[in-house]
Image: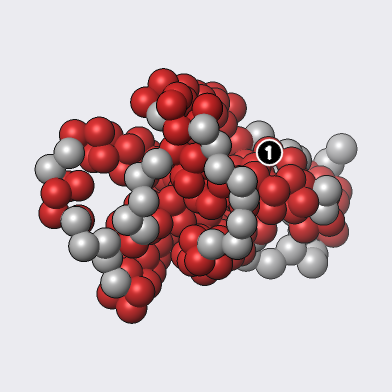
Amino acid sequence: MRDDGLHEVIDNLTLDLKPVQAPIHPALKALFWLFIVVAYIFCVLQWMGVRSDVNERLADSQFLYEIITVGLIGFSAACASVWLSIPDLRGNGWIVVVPIVLGVNFLLWLSLMGSDDLIALDHAHWNHCFEDGLFMAGIPALVIALVSMRGNTTHPYKMAAMNTIAGASAATIGLRFSCGIDSMDHAVLYHVLPFVILGTMLGFFARKIYRW
């Protein structure tokens, strides 16, 4: 093909193309989400009030371990979500494994530390931690969903799971600072179970919510 013909083909193929802005790096999106979550939970706790023994709890190594671990789970889930918004995850498929491994480790630790409470599990009843937790998780879950939906995921179910974990982690940290009950049965029924149910329900609509 002559050069003139080649240039004509290229011109025809690129006639309707317009310049596009390079996408924001996923790590920056995750940091943006983290900033929003910290600010939001801080404001909510100022409004709801913190538990009376918060200073004593902050001096407890087990409490600090729980807060730090849940924070890492939430942030790693948010990172996984924004990377999942890219079809090939930029070759970082391992990033989805991080929140899962941290989550399993945390659940095992909770089970070991609170085995007596779990054996004597109370019957469920309505508790203000239901609504407090959903309120705390609302903005973090909405923000990470909107951020991740700006991409084109090929893994809608994984993204739905990561977004649920991210929102639930933010709420769990907030509840640990606002709720004065430390028993495992309370944590399971009122801090964790609502998000398991909600995440399962959202999972049925994952393909519609996070479509290409």
Q: Hey, which residue is sitting farthest bottom in the picture?
A: 47
Residue at the location (49% across, 40% down)? 185
| Residue 180 can be seen in this image | yes
Q: In the displayed structure, would residue 29 be above or below residue 100?
A: below
At mark 1, the secondary structure is: helix
| Type of amino acid under label 1 | Lys
Which residue does the image show at 26% across and 62% down from the upper left? 51
> Residue 198: x, y in percent?
69, 53
Front-lying residue, 130 or 156 = 130
Q: Note whether residue 102 is visible.
A: no
Residue in the image at 52% along x and 33% along y: 120
* Position of 1 relative to 54 (above/below): above
Q: How is the image coloured?
A: secondary structure
Horizontal and vertical percent position of residue 59: 12, 43
Q: Nearer the viewer, residue 205 or 169?
A: 169
How many circles with numbers are drawn on the protein?
Answer: 1
Q: Give 107 or 161, whichever is nearer the viewer.
A: 107
Count residues near mark 1 (Cα–Cα under 10 Å), then give few for <14, some for 14-19, many for 20+.
some
Locate residue 202, reporting x and y percent.
Answer: 75, 53
Question: Which quadrant would the N terminus be assigned to in this image?
Answer: top right
Q: Which residue is mark 1?
A: 158
Quadrant of the rendered image containing residue 209? bottom right
Q: Position of residue 104 (x, y in %)?
A: 51, 25
Q: Residue at x 25, y 33 (%)?
A: 62
